[in-house]
Image (tube, rainbow, N blue to C red):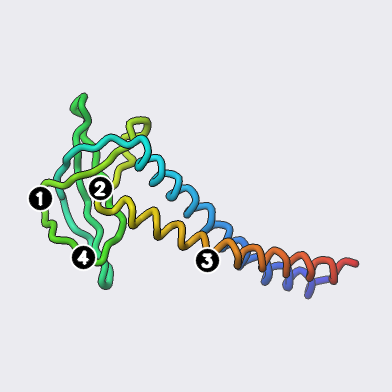
Amino acid sequence: MASQLILLLILGVPSAALVSVAVHTVRTLRAGLRLKTSGISTNGQCVSLAWREDEVSVRFSYALPDGTKHEADSFWMSRTSMCPGTTVSLVYDPASPESAELTECLEPGIRFRRRVLLGVVPVLVLFAAFDTIVLLALFL
């Protein structure tokens, strides 16, 4: 019985990790699609840049028509000509104003998340099928 539980744990952890990745990707993809379809375009200002390996993310601030100020981080990109103080073009969600993205990063972000889902979902289905077969073999 203990070996069966260990096997279930070994099989369950990768599946849980893949489900977590898929759920997060779906949520961020939906947010990006919402920005693309119903977002409001405005201008903001580059506040800072964050680097990781060979990618950069832009932290930008923007004001709503009522004067409320917000800050957000862009999708990671391979390069940018922006520096702090640069005026940036962005899109924000009027229903959730803290959700925003640089105009130039919106389409690449959506494409990237679709590709992640195209890779994760088939693997998740294979894991689920394998887990089911193993469970049936263990308990039948």
For this orientation, the residue located farthest to the right is 140
Badge 2 density bin: few <14, some 14–19, many ≥20, Cα 10 Å: some
User: Where's residue 87, x and y in %?
Assistant: 11, 46
User: Where's residue 103, x and y in %?
Assistant: 25, 48
Q: Amino acid at mark 3?
A: Gly
| Disc 2 and disc 3 in contact, CB within 8 angstroms | no
User: Where's residue 55, x and y in %?
Assistant: 26, 67
Q: Residue at 83%, 71% (x, y): give it.
A: 1
* Mark 4 or mark 2: whose residue is earlier in sequence: 4
User: 3 and 8: which one is in front?
Assistant: 8
Residue tagged by mark 2?
103
SS at mark 2 in the image: helix
Decide if residue 44 is on the left or right side of residue 40: left
Q: Measure how far apart labels 1 and 3 are at the Cα level.
A: 36 Å
Decide if residue 49 is on the left or right side of residue 22: left
Q: Residue at 36%, 35% (x, y): give it.
A: 38
Q: Measure how far apart labels 3 and 4 are at the Cα level.
A: 25 Å
Task: For marks 4 and 2, give the one nearer the viewer.
Answer: 2
